[in-house]
């Protein structure tokens, strides 16, 4: 079995990204963009690609259909150096797809079909749980694009990982049912088994009912999370850990598009965390990684030297300043 530092459990799908769309169409109308691309994606894939580019050994537990899109995703993952032994091909399955519509300023909206991701379940994950054995981190992503994996199941898996001395990481993604009260209750049960939570600002506010990052982070700590990192786009990033409050501004950048930027931030943060940097420096690495990604039309995932020097040029980075 191949060793991995981080095992990602989550959604694999295809993204069709249409860029420079002036506005969303009304029903019955059409709007024209200025470029498009089709890529292997999903939060699990974007995070995995970014981690491997940063030379972090990574495995994924996921599923795809036995169609051309599924074959392409598995080929792209394997060619990037990701361990895909935990990725299951669903017989007669159709691979999930997302249409991402990107504005001129890089903001985006999504329309998705989960397709075979409806077959992604607790039992499928446990079938491939051996992929977590060598990992230091177990990361759950894209939960709301996995209809057959309940938050109760996610809590079971996170608890199991913690009992096996893993560091648990969560990035739920946006709830397509708009954060119903039952969802919030079940999330709180999951949070009690999560070490690091990486929501964006809108998600943090929706979950906690708070309207500023400090209050939202405090609320999330009360639910049992050790480290809270809130991604705030052009306003930068916010972190809270051991009564330390950290706010780091974003880079000034011309945005190409932001689809997958949060996942690349997560990879940059985990680069720092896995190397023993302070939480502040980890956030700086996350900012630098996502800055590089959103500003490049090609070769978008940065290598370690690019992230380190970019962070060093904008923030005060201390080599292994705190052993986390």
Image: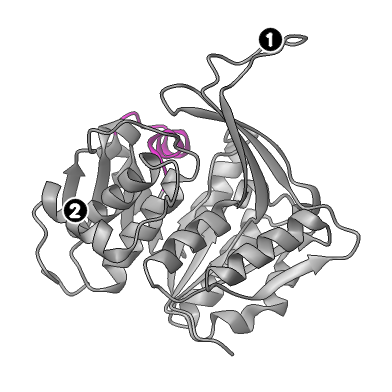
289 or 159, which lies in front?
289
* Whole-percent x, y for residue 115 in the image: 80, 48
132 or 303, which lies in front?
303
Which colour assignment does the render follow? one colour
Residue under circle 1? 26
Q: Quick one: label 2, few (<14), some, or many (20+) residues within 10 Å?
A: many
Tell me the distance, in whole angstroms, between the alpha carbons under discs 2 and 1: 42 Å
Snapshot quadrant of residue 25? top right
157 or 105, which lies in front?
105
Disc ID at residue 203: none
Q: Quick one: label 1, few (<14), some, or many (20+) residues within 10 Å?
A: few
Disc ID at residue 311: 2
Quarter the C terminus occupies: bottom left
* Whole-percent x, y for residue 153 in the image: 65, 62
- Which element type, helix, strand or loop, lies under badge 1? loop
- Extent of the magenta region: 199-212
Residue at horizontal 79%, vertical 67%?
89
């Amino acid at each position: 079995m191949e060793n991995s530092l981080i095992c990602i459990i989550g959604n694999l799908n295809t993204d069709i990204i249409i860029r420079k769309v002036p506005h969303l169409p009304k029903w019955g109308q059409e709007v024209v963009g200025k470029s498009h691309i089709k890529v292997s994606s999903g939060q699990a894939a974007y995070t995995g690609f970014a981690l491997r580019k940063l030379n972090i050994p990574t495995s994924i537990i996921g599923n795809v259909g036995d169609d051309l899109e599924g074959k392409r995703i598995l080929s792209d993952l394997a060619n990037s150096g990701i361990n895909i032994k935990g990725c299951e091909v669903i017989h007669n399955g159709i691979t999930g797809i997302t249409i991402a519509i990107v504005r001129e300023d890089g903001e985006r909206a999504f329309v998705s079909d989960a397709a075979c991701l409806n077959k992604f379940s607790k039992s499928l994950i446990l079938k491939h749980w051996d992929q977590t054995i060598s990992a230091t981190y177990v990361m759950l992503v894209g939960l709301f694009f996995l209809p057959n994996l309940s938050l109760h199941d996610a809590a079971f898996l996170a608890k199991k990982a913690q009992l096996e001395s893993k560091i648990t990481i969560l990035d739920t993604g946006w709830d397509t049912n708009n954060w119903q009260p039952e969802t919030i209750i079940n999330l709180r049960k999951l949070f009690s088994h999560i070490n690091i939570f990486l929501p964006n600002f809108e998600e943090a506010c929706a979950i906690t009912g708070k309207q500023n990052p400090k209050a939202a982070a405090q609320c999330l700590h009360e639910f049992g999370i050790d480290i809270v990192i809130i991604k705030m786009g052009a306003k930068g990033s916010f972190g809270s850990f051991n009564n330390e409050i950290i706010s780091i501004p974003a880079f000034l950048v011309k945005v190409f598009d932001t689809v997958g930027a949060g996942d690349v931030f997560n990879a940059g943060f985990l680069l720092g965390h896995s190397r023993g940097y302070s939480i502040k420096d980890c956030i700086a690495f996350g900012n630098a990684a996502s800055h590089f990604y959103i500003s490049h039309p090609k070769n978008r995932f940065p290598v370690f030297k690019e992230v380190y020097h970019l962070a060093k040029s904008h923030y005060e980075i201390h080599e292994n300043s705190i052993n986390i």
